[in-house]
Amino acid sequence: MAEQPRIDSVSQQAFTGEFPSTQRAESAIKHAFDQISSEDDGTVADYIPISAAADPSLFGISVIETTGEVHEIGDWSHQFSIQSISKMFVYALAIEQHGRDFLHQQIGVNNTGLPFNSVMAIELNGGHPMNPMVNAGAVATTALINGRTSAEKWETIREGLSAFAGRSLSMSGEVYHSEASSNDRNKALARLLASYERMSFDPLEIVDIYTRQCAVNVSTHDIAVMGATLADGGVNPITGQHVVSEETCRDTLAVTAATGLYEGSGDWLFNVGLPAKSGVAGGIVAVTPGKCAIGAFSPPLDGAGNSVRAQRAIGFLSKALGLNVFASRPHHS
């Protein structure tokens, strides 16, 4: 996990039941942006050909409260591909369709402790994908989405992600074709799952759908709205649409907290204390139930595939705004 910046003029706050005032939130977000934007740690991903061309200077932050209040700075409107951030929302859609017990049995909830695209993790666990936030588990989750054909499954996913974002989302054809030309490992994972009878749909068609969902274009504003929907019991705070149930939000955030930043999830939870999911394009969304979600984006990544600036910004705001779900202060009568 990226080293966290020092909290200088913004003091650390304990978790409370209320989001801080607008003035404090705006001050903290500006402070985070000003302090972190000049940092240049990390490397832009190059194993997806088009990702290598990303501008490493891009940096945006969006914080959206469950009330619908919006706070944004930097390149918050810049469009990038959602990539693995889609995993948590497609998992939520799958829970909504099939129930938590079925998903628990089919996919699992435990961290593999291995890289996100590990083949060994499947073999070591008897063909069980272990959790929906690594590639094998995400591909298996995508296969469970309702639809008789690939086209129906893809449209169900696109419409579901759009409901979370509060606007109609579309796929980047350029990103899709770039990933489709270099996703042999995901195809191998899908075939391996099929060999263990963990997939009832054509594995290569499922990988194609999964590649499409990862190529959906979003901004930090979009992923913050999506996260805020999970923070608000499944109701989109911008549109008012009831997207998923309260129970689905709870289960999705629990799994995300444990596994959302791959093998760095334990360090992240210890230091930042928020359920969060990252994507290789440089986005991260973090959620404080009942309060808000933070979307942050910057392309340079650490060794685990997580945006360095986005991690530092969210870590800063978790402390400054009292968002860490494990932090508390003594009750005084």
Image (tube, rainbow, N blue to C red):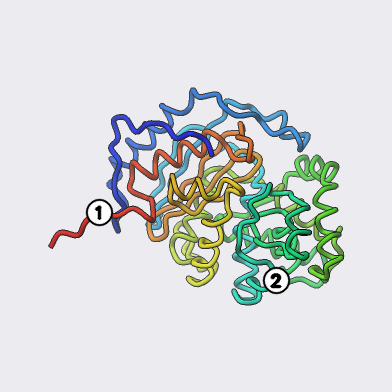
Q: Residue 141, how many percent across, how many down?
A: 70, 64
Q: Secondary structure at mark 1?
A: loop
Q: 117 and 290: which one is in front?
A: 117
Q: 292 and 132: which one is in front?
A: 132
Residue 139, relative to residue 58: is it above or below?
A: below
Q: Residue 225, how many percent across, how many down?
A: 50, 53
Q: Is residue 48 left or right of residue 15?
A: right
Q: Is residue 312 left or right of residue 107?
A: left
Q: 319 and 262: which one is in front?
A: 262
Residue 18, relative to residue 174: is it above or below?
A: below
Question: Residues at badges 2 and 1 in contact (C-beta under 8 Å)?
Answer: no
Q: Is residue 306 left or right of residue 173?
A: left
Q: Secondary structure at mark 2?
A: helix
- Residue under the image location 47 percent in, 50 percent down: 269
Q: Which residue is mark 1?
A: 329
Q: Which residue is mark 2?
A: 106
Local crowd at mark 2 within 10 Å, few (<14), some, or many (≥20)? many
Where residue 217 sits, quadrant-wise, is top right
Residue sitting farthest toward the front: 124
Amino acid on which the number 2 mark rests in the picture: Gln
- Residue under the image location 54 percent in, 39 percent down: 1
- Residue under the image location 44 percent in, 44 percent down: 271
Residues at marks 2 and 1, CA–CA distance in whole angstroms? 39 Å
Residue sitting farthest toward the left: 333
